[in-house]
Image (tube, grey):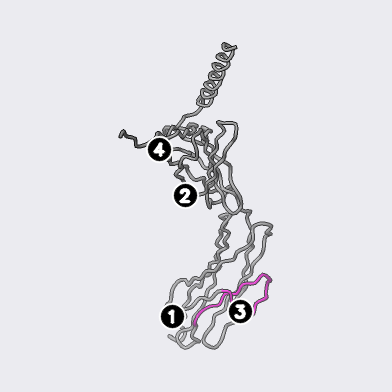
């Protein structure tokens, strides 16, 4: 029975798209699930998240961000990374992501691909201060 | 001839008095010889306005024929202003960030300024300080 015991948890990846001047930071959350065979299966060490600007184009080993599994079953593992996209003159740009599980000597196939499009926002100047007052020292 | 000179002198005094009355008509006046603290409320960051990186403060005198401008920069919402010279001054403040500068808020605008705890315009008058010390030997 133990042989067929599976532990399932979710590996979550948070992608932050930052733009300081416009205050247009956005967070895109992408999730995958992972079935871990216990205890006779391969020992997963972690997950590699790959990012691409072209669908289906990824190279094993050149991952974008890595989540390390510490042998503790949790509902969720999360990692984060930042994409900085120019706001001035920027155009909506799609990004594609896949994930793999890896062990000490092997890496799984790529997961199904997910994608998101980031729409840059124009940077903005500040507003006008108010309530200018003077106090004698 | 001498009478004409007296009339001219009186007329000049009248004009100067009227100018002061006009100047003070719609605004409060802070008269001081000491440094003053000028503060303001930061503009809000919203869909149309970006965050503030710093403030520019412009202190302008136009009471005499030559307009003199003194510029200051701060990351705080206040400055301590030492007497730039003996004169009447107006104060303007604007917020800046890497995208550019916002609108000037002016101490002579009752919608931008607060005087005696109420919305109201104000000007500054830095007096000539009295001589210090003194004694008889």
- In magenta, the rendered stretch is A45-64
Mark 3 neighbour class, 10 Å CA radius: few under 14, some 14 to 19, many 20 or more: few
User: Nearer the observer, disc 3 or disc 4?
Assistant: 4
Rendering quarter of residue B137: top left
Mark 1 to mark 4 CA distance (whole Å)? 64 Å
Q: Secondary structure at mark 2?
A: loop
Q: Which residue is mark 1?
A: A71
> Could you confirm whether marks 4 and 2 are on the same chain?
no
| Mark toward the start of the polypeptide (1 vs 3) | 3
Chain on which label 3 sits: A
For the residue labelled by badge 3, is the local secondary structure a helix, a strand or a loop? loop
Q: Is residue B63 magenta?
A: no
* Among numbered discs 1 and 4, the one appearing first in the sequence: 1
Q: Position of residue A39 (x, y in %)?
A: 45, 86
Residue A62 disc label: 3
Q: Residue at x 34, y 37 (%)?
A: B133
**Cβ–Cβ below 8 Å for labels 1 and 2?**
no
């Amino acid at each position: 029975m133990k042989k067929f015991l599976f532990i399932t948890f979710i590996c979550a990846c948070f992608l932050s798209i930052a733009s300081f001047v416009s205050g247009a930071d956005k967070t895109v959350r992408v999730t995958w699930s992972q079935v871990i065979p216990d205890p006779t299966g391969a020992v997963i060490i972690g997950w590699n998240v790959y990012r691409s600007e072209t669908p289906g184009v990824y190279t094993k080993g050149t991952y974008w961000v890595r989540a390390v599994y510490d042998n503790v079953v949790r509902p969720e593992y999360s990692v984060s990374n930042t994409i900085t996209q120019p706001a001035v003159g920027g155009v909506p740009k799609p990004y594609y992501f896949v994930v793999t599980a890896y062990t000490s000597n092997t890496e799984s196939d790529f997961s199904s691909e997910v994608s998101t499009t980031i729409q840059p926002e124009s940077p903005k100047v500040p507003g006008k201060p108010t309530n200018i007052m003077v106090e004698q020292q | 001839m001498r009478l004409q000179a007296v009339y001219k002198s009186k007329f000049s005094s009248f004009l100067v008095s009227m100018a002061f009355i006009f100047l003070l008509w719609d605004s409060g006046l802070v008269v001081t010889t000491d440094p003053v603290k000028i503060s303001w409320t930061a503009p809000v960051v919203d869909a149309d306005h970006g965050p503030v990186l710093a403030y520019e403060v412009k202190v302008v005198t136009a009471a005499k024929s030559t307009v003199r401008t003194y510029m200051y920069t701060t990351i705080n919402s206040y400055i301590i202003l030492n007497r730039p010279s003996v004169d009447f001054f107006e104060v303007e403040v604007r917020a800046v960030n890497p995208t550019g500068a916002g609108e000037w808020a002016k101490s002579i605008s009752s919608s931008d300024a607060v005087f005696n705890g109420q919305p109201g315009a104000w000007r500054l008058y830095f007096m000539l300080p009295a001589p210090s010390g003194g004694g008889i030997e």
